[in-house]
Image (cartoon, coloured by chain):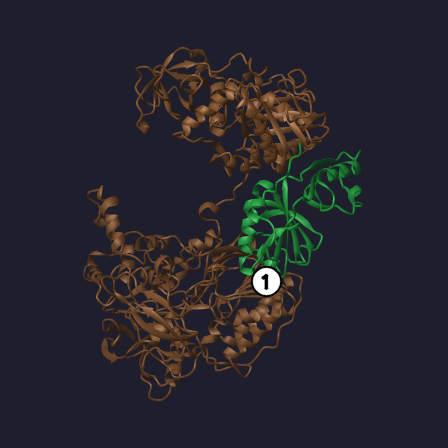
Chain colours: A green, B brown
Amino acid sequence: MSFMPRHILEERIGDFGRPVHADHLTVLRRPAIASVLAGGPVEALSGMAEVSLRPVGPGQWLAVSQSLPGSLLAESLAAALAGLGAHVVDQSDGFVLMHIAGPNVRRILAKCIAVDLHGDVFAIGQAAAMMCCHVAANVARVGADAFEIAVPRSYADDVFEEIVEMGREFSLTSAFDDA
Amino acid sequence: MSAFRLSHGGLVDRSRGIGFRFDGDDLRGYEGDTLASALLASDRLLVGRSFKYHRPRGIVTAGSAEPNALLTIGTGARSEANTRATVQELYDGLVAKSQNRWPSLKHDFGAINGLLSPFLGAGFYYKTFMWPAAFWEKVYEPMIRRAAGLGRAVMEADPDRYEKAWAHCDLLVIGAGPAGLMAALTAARAGARVILADEGFRLGGSLLSERVSIGNAAAADFVRDVLQELASLDTVTLMPRTTVFGWYDDNVFGAVEKVQKHLASPSPDLPVERLWRIAAKAAILASGAEERPLVFGGNDRPGVMMASAARTYLNRFGVGAGRKVAVFTNGGSGYQAARDLASQGAEIAAIIDGRASAGEAMPAGTRMIVNAGVTKTLGRHRIEGLVVERSGHEETIDCDALLMSGGWSPVIHLACQRGAKPVWSEELQAFVAPDVGPRLWLAGSAAGLSGIGDCLRDGSAKALDCLAALGKPGSAPEMPEVEGEYDAGFAPLWYVPGARDKAFVDFQNDVHVRDLSLAQREGFGHIEHTKRYTTLGMATDQGKLGNVNTVGIVAGMRGVSPAEIGTTTFRPFYTPVSFGAMAGTARAERARPTRTSPLHGWAKKNGAQFVDAGLWFRSAWFPQSGEKGWRQSVDREVLAVRANVGLCDVSTLGKIEVFGRDAAEFLNRVYSNAMLKLPVGRARYGLMLREDGMVYDDGTVSRFAEDHFLITTTTAYATEAMAHLEFCAQALWPNLDVRFVSVSDQWAQMSLVGPKARLVLEKIVEDDVSNAAFPFLAARAVTLKGGLKARLFRISFSGELAYELAVPANYGEAVADVLMEAGRPHDICPYGVEALNVMRIEKGHVTHAEIDGRTTPDDLGLGKMFAASKPDFIGKRLSSRFGLTAADRLQLVGLRPVDKAKELTAGAHLLKEGAKPSMANDQGHVTSVCFSPVLGRSIGLALLKSGRERYGEKIVVWDKLRGHDEIVAEVCSPVFVDPENSKLHQ
């Protein structure tokens, strides 16, 4: 038997032939995401080049990788943390990862997020848990004008729709990464 | 013809004409006009009718304090009532209508109220409309509301978009007049992140109305240069058309930006208004000062206007308020207005000064009447003259405009919105803001200064203070020379004696001096009481113009200083804010976020009807063709599941992974039943209590490893339970090694239920799921055929053989499809929460209908889940208190009507047979009911006093509050189906 995964935004985004403007939202179809729970620091993971570790709260991180498959990420993290009293949970299906970038990205996100996203305050490489469109999200700055937003899957439809609505002013476009 | 447009001057573009409509008349203005300036330029002095007496009213101010010129702008669903013409930007095609008049503005039937005014004093309706009492709600109140009032809201849905946004800065400058501009410039040059917000559509504040030169340039050019520099810096955000309306905790300011209120057809890609929350490290309030009216007889006649407003219309909009202008003043502002108007060719009929000696020099020939007061104005829909009185000698003077100036009040509202009370300054004869801490500073006229040069310097100085506090040193820009300033000093004149017509203190609410007197006489002397009794300072202008005069006059009536009277309370919003802006996009179905189950698509293609369950949409039932009504579908689903097999989406339940060396100990303390020795690979039903011993939530606990559990919560309490666990771990037992994370979204979970469930499951699960290998309450990771990793739990909410299969959410729909296919030979049936609910009632399982915060485990028949032998757990201590062990507590029972055809209703009360319905005789209530297709009758669960001892008793089910007849029901065990649990273990 083979089961085909279905992304929650499949129906909303559709397939190919969507325009790409300067301000664009990319939905990553199959990112690998895992929750890392640990009592102490997780320096053991700093060597994992393909993994971005994003703080969620005390002793909790969201590990994100766009190259490793979902289950492999959780396994390699668990292996790297073995014996350190840490725990890893695969959450690749639990979150939807959106990459939003463009010259007006901060002006768009100012309508979704209460946190100050100015580069002096929230620098490239930083990530934090924050509300995005009334939903608990993890937001990371991945470039001067680029952010990644991870939201729980069940809310993703709602958050996506709201971000796109807030982007109308700047003709924000959206598509899957493999479109 | 009195008010008129000058041929030149001002900041309007005479090459760009704009057509608009007022009460059906086509009029024209220019780009840069407000609606008010365009109306004045067209000599439309009469623009509205007053609230109570329907007196003719004209434009009084040129800003946001306007009490009279309130118009309905727009048509159809875009109509907006009570728009102040003085701040409404003129646009091509604008349609404005006057309000509170019938049949027309000129001939208003309601003006008869003016004749009845002796009977309509403050509070008249409390005294007059007392009998019969029943008339108040149905007759009097609707009648009064119709007769009085402002514009009407339209009942059509608002077609426009609104947004909400956040902004952050080092320094927020509120007001772009002289102080605000210099503050912003000083801070911006020091590299600070600055937001400069101003309610006007053109930044510059009072400088746009001045004829002074600043640094050898016209004031407007100075403004342009400063703004150009500010706009060139990417650390500066200029926000015109933005009213900062409130100051909130943590130095967050509320502001509303009118993005497209100046366009006839707004772009659908932009909001019409945007609500800003501005988080500022520091803020400077440079909101200027408001000129006070004078309170004299007939001071509300159209054509009577604030002196500063007349200067604004003249200098900014190129509109003369009149050709023969009288001035009534107690300070320099009135003289300056006279000078400005005279320089443009207006005749000055007289300057009447309430002070004992003349303030300033005027051009030769100007008539000056000092130590005098106006007692009456002449004319009907516009002023034609006035009566001035000095020492008992009266004189009539012709004029077509009367400018008044009663001094100045700093605009300090924002600074006093968080509890600080304004302080009376004898020196300034005005209320000023007290020290409100280091994060909000007042600058310029808002801080009591009057000269433009002083305001420029003060803005810069305050910005430097802010920068120092933020650790960003700056330096003051070079201060330009200001030429042509006037002395705005004044002497107080609260009450002008000898009024021969009503002397209004509050134009908008038609409150005049005699109303204030009445309030004093009748014991409403405290200024807050005076306000409520007379309605002064209410409605859209919130007393911006009149309140200070009220305080001064009441102080005079009582023979005390205004300091003793104080002000009423300042609260947000500074000016009215639309509900649309406050709602933003959160309206209709988007009023809150929605959550989508991973099996939503599966349910949809199987024809589900959905129901709101918190933020979720859950599949409620799956109608088939030919079925009439939901009950028929639900009955079929229940029978099919109990006979064969059914599939139900249970993904919405909360799922939390619990890890750690002490995870078992932690859960043992959180749940009331024993968890310590739960074997790996097994699941157990668990009950959480609150500290007070009441049941909090229920769910299952599965153990995957010694230090790894998965717990489930109810859908409703998923978030709360997670927060509860966090609290327990962080605050109660920080020494325990335990961590958790929600995986509610990671898994699609489906219930496969019914005697043939295993036959279906076997077809897709690789592992052995036989009764021996996977017994009741087994819980393990399994592999589906083809390799997909899943989790399988043998738990049941229906009493049937049942499994819950969890697969990664993105695979949920595909797995459910395959299960449906595999179940086809066994007549598999998708079912929803309605059938789920019927089956749990048949089996006597509880939900939050029974776990209502007032029930203990024993009340619910779950006493054996209270493990008293455990050393401690949440809820244990308080469970032994007297009330919780009483013998007559409500206990869970089943009910079945004696007459099989009758139907129970949830919420009905229980009474002993023959007992009179009363709270004293109340025996309990019905919590859940359903029609049981298995039993072919209505059944229910109820909480009944000492219920378990009363099986077999007949009891009256009473629900007459909702119009249902009494039903006699038999009390029975809450388990209606398979009480021996034989099906669970098949």
Q: In this view, does B653 lie above or below B508?
A: above
Q: Where is residue B199 in the image (x, y as percent from the top left)?
A: 47, 65
Q: Is residue B628 above or below residue B55?
A: above
Residue closest to the far bottom:
B364
The total of numbered circles placed on residues is 1
User: Would residue B402 appear left or right of B657 to someone viewing this image?
Assistant: left
Check the picture and name the quadrant holding the C terminus of chain B: top right
* Chain ID of residue with mark 1: B
Question: Residue B367 occupies which quadrant of the picture?
Answer: bottom left
Check the picture and name the quadrant holding the N terminus of chain B: bottom left
Question: Residue B697 occupies which quadrant of the picture?
Answer: top right
Q: Where is residue B943 in the image (x, y as percent from the top left)?
A: 44, 20
Q: Which of B661 and A93 is in front in this view?
A: A93
Q: Is residue B302 above or below residue B623?
A: below
User: Would residue A71 appear left or right of B63 to someone viewing this image?
Assistant: right
Q: Position of residue B761 (x, y in %)?
A: 62, 24
Q: Which of B226 and B330 is in front in this view?
A: B226
Q: Position of residue B782 (x, y in %)?
A: 68, 27
Q: Report which residue position mark 1 lands on.
A: B171
The local secondary structure at tag 1 comes to strand
Looking at the image, can residue B411 be seen? yes
Looking at the image, can residue B331 be seen? no
Question: Residue A64 occupies which quadrant of the picture?
Answer: top right
- Residue in the image at 30% along x and 19% along y: B916
User: Would residue B222 appear left or right of B580 to someone viewing this image?
Assistant: right
Q: Is residue B33 above or below residue B472?
A: below
Q: Which of B354 and B589 is in front in this view?
A: B589
Residue closest to the far front:
B825
Q: Mark 1 belongs to which amino acid?
A: Leu
Q: Which of B948 and A144 is in front in this view?
A: A144
